[in-house]
Each structure stands twice: as C-alpha cells, then as structure tokens.
Image (cartoon, grey):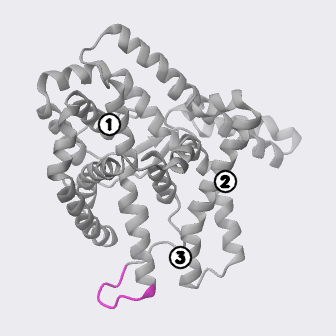
Amino acid sequence: MLRFPLVLLIVFLHCKGTPDFDPIDWYHFGVMDGYNFMRHYLSNVISSVSVPTFFFMSGYLFYYRSSTFTLKLYKEKIMRRIRTLLVPYLFWNILFLVGILFFVVRSSECSNMWSDVIALLKEYGGWRVFWDCQLMNIEIEQPIGFIQDNSAPLLVPMWFVRDLWVVSLFSPVLWWLVKKFGIAFVCMLGGCYVFQIWPYMHGLSSVSFFFFSMGILLSMYSYNIEIFFKKMGRNILVLTILLSLVLVYLTDIQNVYQPYILRGFAILACLSALYIGYLNLDCNKTWLVRISKASFVIYAAHMVFISKYVRILLGRLMPSENVVFLSFEYFMVPIITTCICVFIYYVVKRFFPKMMLLLNGGR
C-alpha cells in the first residue's frame, strides 16, 4: 500500500520546480517565499523518506517468517532477486544507453558516427555505465564523518537497485549480526549512517545497510510491532512533522548540520510512514493496490526524458513568472510524469507481456 505514495514522492524529489531556489525571507514572508517553502518541504525534506523506507521493507521481507537462516533459503532469495533486481537493473541501463546512443548517432555525421559513440562511452567510463559513472550530491567537508558522494549508474535512479542488490548479497552477515547483537548492532549502524562514519565504496551505502538491517530486526521480532505503534506511533508522527518544519529552515539557510538532522529525520519519517501504513491496514484501496504494480516502472522510467519534456511542454504553455502557474507546474509535472509511466506500464504489459517481465522484474 505504501509503494505508490513513496514512489510518487521520489518523482517529486527529482522534479523540484522552477526557478532555482531563492533564500526565503523569513521576516517578510511573501507569496514567492511560500512557494519556495512548499518546494523545500515536499521535494527536499518529506521526499527523503522514500528510499530508506524501501530499503527497510526489503530487509523486513527478506527473512520474513524465517526463524532460522539456511543456505537453501539464502540461495532461493538471491535467485529471486536476480530476477527482480539484477535483470531489470541491467535491462533499464542498457535501454537508456541505447536511447542516448541513438540521439548521438542521429546528430553525428556519418564519417564521425562511431568515433562519437566511442568518445561518449569513454566519457562515461566504459563498463562503469552499469555501476558508478554518475556522481551526484557531492557533499562538502563535514564537521563529523567522512566526505561522501553518491554515485549512480547511467540511469541515475537505478543506484537504489544496485545498492539493494549489494546489501542482499551481504544479508547472511547482517542476519547473523542482528541475531547476535540485536538492537545494539542496528543502533551502531544508525550512528554510522547519521554521521557518515562509513567507508567510501560505491554500492556499499550506509543508508542501505542500516535500513535493511533495521528491517531484519523488526522482522525477527514482528510480534512487537503492533504494540510499539500503539504506544509510540502517534508521538513519532508528531515529532516527524515538527522536525520536518525545522528542516525546511535549516535547508534554506544551508546549515552545516542539516545533513545529519535530515538523516535522523529519515529514520523518524520511515517509522511514521510504517505507522501510517499500519493505520490503513484495513482500508480497501483497490485502485491503490492496482496502481502500485506500476511502482517500479514509475521509479525507473520517470527520469528517462519523460519528466524533462513534460516540464518543457508546461513551461511553454504557461508564463513561468506567475507564482500561481509556477505552483501549478510544480505539482503537475510529477503527476503527469507518473500518469505517463503508469500508461506505459499497462500498454507494455498488455501488448508485450514478456518485455514487461524484464522491465518490472516479474512483479
């Protein structure tokens, strides 16, 4: 039930609206300041819950209802994740690479076509298009922890699938450590995640190891989840909302401690998202369940030129200086992009079901 709302937040994360963020005038709060506040709140703060929650759910389900670890179980899980993670990961990156090469070939002269293609592949680092050819969100030196940057394959959103595949391979080690040390080990990983005390290795991210282990922990002691949410769920949700408002201010002024607080917020927000899901367990949202089947395609495809051209089209149709039109564009670009991705999912599934098995990992 949470999959579609979370993936929609990811689309908002990558569609921050126009123009670039200006500092908010907190003393003379105007209409444009309200527009920037809204964008900060939704695209820079609230959307940070999505990827951690997906890592958590993956860890929770990996050993769900498995009281003991066996090599047979691990083999079954890995074989399933080859189909659901590795195959679509490679397929989407290849598809995106072919699309880029197509545009390169179209714009090149016949005599320079192959040299342009080779030059592009060299620029991306050859085989690194499938691992870490893109660097994003490079962080400046921090008061605590190590300098980190996030890497991604050619199709940027696939970094999550890459890191999930890697942490799945390490799952027996994580399962044993969680079983041996329990919440103490998960808290240690949480500290490493928040303060970025973590080795600089692309594919082995602190966010994946911490939230995946957190999912394993709660899966082992699943009988306590309902009691925990009944006692603490509402308080965590209120604290999450209050902290999110503080983070908008810290993000706007580019406070040096904002990244640490944002990562701490992601932990609370993940628990709040699970609490909201818990409150809606008995709700019969058939349409939400149906549309959630397209979540992986939405996640993978929304940055494959779709959101870019939707933004360009809306920008030409409406004057961008008016804050009302800017707000309309800000909300409509992610919504239209998501609708196009859902449409692609159902069309391909209807007419090319075998291709959809590759695109969607058999989900």
Q: Label 1: how many residues lie within 10 Å, few (<14), some (14-19) or many (20+)?
A: some
- Of labels 1 and 2, earlier in sequence is 1
Q: Is residue 143 left or right of residue 104?
A: left
Q: Secondary structure at mark 2?
A: helix
Q: Position of residue 141 (x, y in %)?
A: 28, 53
Mark 1 → mark 3, Cα distance in angstroms: 38 Å
Q: What range is drawn magenta here?
A: 24-31
Mark 1 → mark 2, Cα distance in angstroms: 37 Å
Q: The C terminus lies in which quarter of the figure?
A: top right
Mark closer to the observer (1, 2): 2
Q: Secondary structure at mark 1?
A: loop
Q: Is residue 317 left or right of residue 329?
A: right
Is 27 contained in the magenta span? yes
Residue at image point 83% right, 46% down: 106
Mark closer to the observer (3, 2): 2
Q: Nearer the viewer, residue 44 or 99?
A: 44
- Which numbered tag is attached to residue 340? 2
Kind of residue at badge 3: Ser
Q: Nearer the viewer, residue 249 or 138?
A: 249
Mark 3 highlights which residue?
327
Mark 1 highlights which residue?
200
Whether tag 3 and tag 2 are in contact, CB under 8 A, the answer is no
Kind of residue at badge 1: Tyr
Residue at image point 13% right, 21% down: 180
Vertical relation: 334 (above or below) 273: below
